[in-house]
Amino acid sequence: MKKKWYLFVFTLLLLTSLPFSTAKVIAGSYGSADGLEWQNGPATISLDGIATINVPDNFAFFDEENAKRFMQENSPPPNGSEIGALYNMKMQLFWNVIFEYHNTGYINDSDKSDLDADELLESYQQSPEGQREKATAESKSSVLRWDVEPKYEEDKHQLRYSLGWRDSLQSGLVKYKVNFLTREGYFSVILVTTSHKFEESQKQFEDMVLQHITINNGHTYEEFNASVDKKSELGLTNLIPGGDKVASTKKSERVALLIRVIIFIVAASAVASISIALYRKQKHRQPIASLSSTELTEAVTPTHIEAVDQPHPEKHKY
């Protein structure tokens, strides 16, 4: 996988460094080469109607069709969620950007305080995907680590993280992902660069790309309408590598805790009901020793017996 990504980045740099005698410029803002077409910056681009980006100068924007075709020909293959890509035209910049959109439904961010980087890292290492990556020849001597630990910015509704394998020289490919939560799902902006250039590339990426992305009206996270919009069962944890298992485990723990609480409440209610019944019964049962002789006589002699033994005056009248 790592070799393929290096080939991918190398091919991008090769393509974006083509001389203008090879790359055809159309109407001053479009370019093409080898059957691929792109739009040159500066330009304002709509990303599948979900978001808008201001493409900076010296960058080329590939739409969904051309981005997928380029990735298909140069590997790794697209995952089907791509809606565009941004490739730089300057050899001084060592990074490119891929845009994805996932129509999962509205994602509740209530687990924002539960993002445990160590737990997620361990979960991913033990996952089938993590095991497959570790088994590759390139990764056998590598260590999985966070370049950027998972962090959620609640005011922006953005989830950021970067996870990858690093060899003994701490080299490798970095995919820094920023997820924008929307009304219908989430929009991913992925920085692709090398580990040795990551800090420099990240700052450029933040300034030149992230600051110029806007979620369109009608699609913002705040506009979610529970009465009409689809709601996802995913949480923030599910969007992070290793998160599915962590989220599933925590859900099971919550269910188990809820069951224990319900059992406790039912048991406590039953005990309380029995205690109240016994208390009321005991309250009405006054001890015989505490009764006076008159009260004792009245207690053991039913009043109806007296009424039966006493003849009714009316019966003796003639």
Image (tube, rainbow, N blue to C red):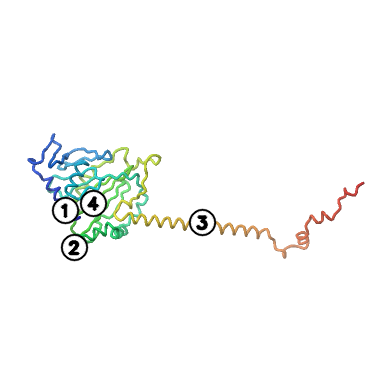
| N-term mark: 3 or 4 | 4
Q: For mark 3, what is the residue?
A: 265
Query: Badge 2 local density, few (<14 within 10 Å), some, or many (20+)?
Result: few
Q: Residues within 10 Å of mark 3 (few under 14, many from 20)?
A: few
Residue at (34, 56) in percent of width and height: 245
Give the mark nearest the N terminus, 1 or 4.
1
Asked which secondary structure carries label 3, the reply is helix
The residue that disc 2 covers is: 168
The CA span between labels 3 and 4 is 47 Å
* Mark-to-mark CA distance, 1 and 2: 18 Å
Q: Are the residues flagged by discs 1 and 4 in contact, CB closer than 8 Å?
A: no
The amino acid type, in three-letter code, at marker 4 is: Tyr
Residue at left offset 40%, top offset 40%: 227
Amino acid type, residue under disc 3 in the picture: Ile
Q: Amino acid at mark 1?
A: Tyr
In percent of width and height, residue 119 lies at 32, 59
Of residues 216 and 7, the one nearer the viewer is 7
Q: Helix, strand or loop at disc 2?
A: loop
Q: Position of residue 181 (x, y in %)?
A: 31, 45
Q: Distance from label 2 to label 4 (Cα)?
A: 21 Å
| Tag nearer the camera, 1 or 4 | 1
Mark 4, residue position: 176
On the image, numbered disc 1 is attached to which residue? 6
